[in-house]
Amino acid sequence: MNNETTTLISLKKAMKRVDHKLQALEAQFKELDNTKDTLTQKFEHHSKTLASQAAQDEMWTAVLALKFTTMELNILYSYVIEVLISLHTRVLEKLPDLVRGLPTLTSVLRRKVKNKRIRVVWESVLEECGLQEGDIMALCTFFIAHGHKADHYAAKARQMYIRDLTFMITNMVKYQALQDGLLRAVQVIEKGKAVRTPEEQKSSLKELIPSIKN
């Protein structure tokens, strides 16, 4: 075996060793990349959880800070409870086979997280009413905080006691998410569907334009 042959064999062995090392490095990089993706997902989930918790805390603070009279509170409660009952009824109408499994609105909210069919129906009901998840959080928080001490007023009594409920809400409720939720509850009962303000419509259009361009 001459020197050239020996050199060629040594070179091939060296190239194989380099190739093996490159494969090992590639596997390590893939593992690191997967780890990075996992950590990123966990961080994003944790950030969303913290943001959600902060929003809930702010909502509770705003609801408990309300300074309505007993009569005003009863009137707002009447709209809130009627909307929540209406939402539950609409969901059951679309899911008649699940009536026994969804006895309350709470059961709908709990089960929609893992049940796609319930979630799709819930989202369609919200869209029909012109409501959003943030509105539901506001209404449910209001109901939990004040429902035990409030009385339901019929429509005629509500109109007799307060002429301009919109003015009362915008004047007394400063936390925007709670104000929006209460105003939309009134709209759903009085008009059949909540109507977005021009500012909200512009905001939604801005969010839609990038997706259309893409």
Image: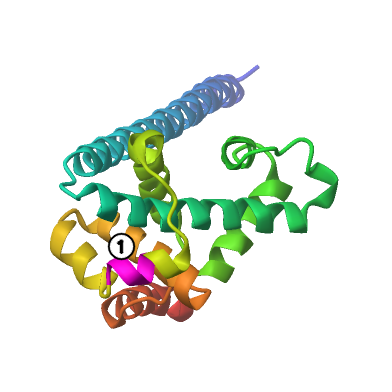
Q: Which residues are magenta?
A: 158-162
Where is residue 17 shown, x and y percent of the image?
53, 20
In the rendered image, the vertical position of residue 107 relative to residue 187, given as above or below = above
The x, y position of residue 79, in whole percent, is: 43, 58
Q: Which element type, helix, strand or loop, lies under badge 1?
A: helix
* Quarter-of-image position of residue 147: top left
Whether residue 78 appears in this view of the structure is: yes
Colour treatment of the image: rainbow
Q: Is 39 situated above or below 13? A: below
110 relative to 139, above or below:
above
Res 10 → quadrant = top right
Q: Pinpoint residue 207: horizontal percent, then vertical percent.
A: 37, 72
In the image: residue 123, left or right of residue 81:
right
Residue 120 in view in this figure: no
Towards the viewer: 163 or 136: 163
Q: Quadrant of the N terminus?
A: top right
| Residue 141: image location, x then y, percent | 36, 41
The residue under label 1 is: 180
* Label 1, residues with CA under 10 Å away: few <14, some 14-19, many ≥20: many
Q: Quadrant of residue 36?
A: top left
Along the line of sight, the residue nearer the viewer: 175 or 41: 175
What residue is shown at x 30% (from left), y 38% (from top)? 56
Which residue occupies the extreme right position in the image?
97
Name the side, left or right, on which 10 lies relative to 160.
right
Q: Going 78% across and 52% down the picture, which residue do you hit?
A: 95
Magenta residue check for 160? yes
Amino acid tagged 1: Asp
Residue 15 forms part of the magenta stretch: no
Is 57 placed left or right of 158 in the picture? Answer: left
